[in-house]
Image (cartoon, grey):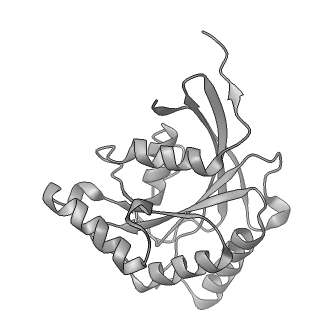
Amino acid sequence: MSIRPVEARFVTTAVGPEGYPTGGTPEIAFVGRSNVGKSSMINTLSGRKKLVRVSNTPGRTRTLNFFDVDLVRGDVRRSVRFADLPGYGFAKVQKTQRATWEEMITSYLERREELRGVVSIIDAEVGPTPDDVRTLGYLRRAGRPTLVVATKLDRLAKARRRPKLRAIAQTLGVEPEWVLGFSATEKLGLTEVLEAVWELTGMRDTSVDPP
């Protein structure tokens, strides 16, 4: 039975624990290098074209941004909170600013009780960068369940997609089933990523009111 988003809304912006939203909604964090298509991906998963601002300037996101998305599968409705984290690997950011971002991100990833899993976003065309490999290693050490999603899959010829995903899994040292392809442009992989988010968040379901 397919999953679909029915409502999405901006919650808040934070730079530290004192600004995190309350309420206990299960969270999924999205991490990836700058300009990897993270904002477009969140918009597609939420069913909202402009929930997250898409910028042509890498490094634009400088805070933790939280969005609530209501998902429905059959007669079950689940609220999930998406945490959009600043992109990494943007060379033009000053070292002091980068250190501040890293502290903000690691504090959230290590201490946030509501965090159920992390979506680590890789550019399917480029493949894993050294920053991607380091980030995935850090997430493993932090003990966070992590799903790797390779974006911009539409830029690859169809015959190259599956081999590329297998190569990404091999490079990162993860099981192939934990690497999914995705395209915000063509909605490729949308169902599979929503299924994974559904499985990671797990609890606190409510029945959908009958029409």
Camera sees residue 126: no
Instruction: Please report the residue visible at 75 percent of the width from the left and 46 percent of the height from the top.
Output: 25
Q: Which quarter of the picture shows residue 28?
A: bottom right
Seen in the image, is 34 located left or right of residue 170? right
Instruction: Please report the residue visible at 83 percent of the width from the left and 50 percent of the height from the top.
Output: 22
Residue 123 lies, in percent from the top left, at: 35, 68
Residue 48 lies, in percent from the top left, at: 49, 38
- Residues 124 and 206: in front is 206
Q: What residue occupies the far top of the structure in this picture?
A: 211
Q: How many marks?
A: 0
Above or below residue 8? Residue 128 is below
Seen in the image, is 59 located left or right of residue 158? right
Instruction: Please report the residue visible at 31 percent of the width from the left and 59 percent of the height from the top.
Output: 152
- Residues 82 and 72: in front is 72
Instruction: Please report the residue visible at 48 percent of the width from the left and 55 percent of the height from the top.
Output: 39
Q: Looking at the rendering, in which quadrant would you find the C terminus?
A: top right
Residue 118 lies, in percent from the top left, at: 58, 62
- Residues 108 and 193: in front is 193
Seen in the image, is 161 located left or right of residue 65? left
Q: Which quarter of the picture shows residue 175?
A: bottom left
Q: What residue occupies the far right of the structure in this picture?
A: 18
Camera sees residue 195: yes
Residue 143 lies, in percent from the top left, at: 66, 72
Q: Which quarter of the picture shows residue 8?
A: top right
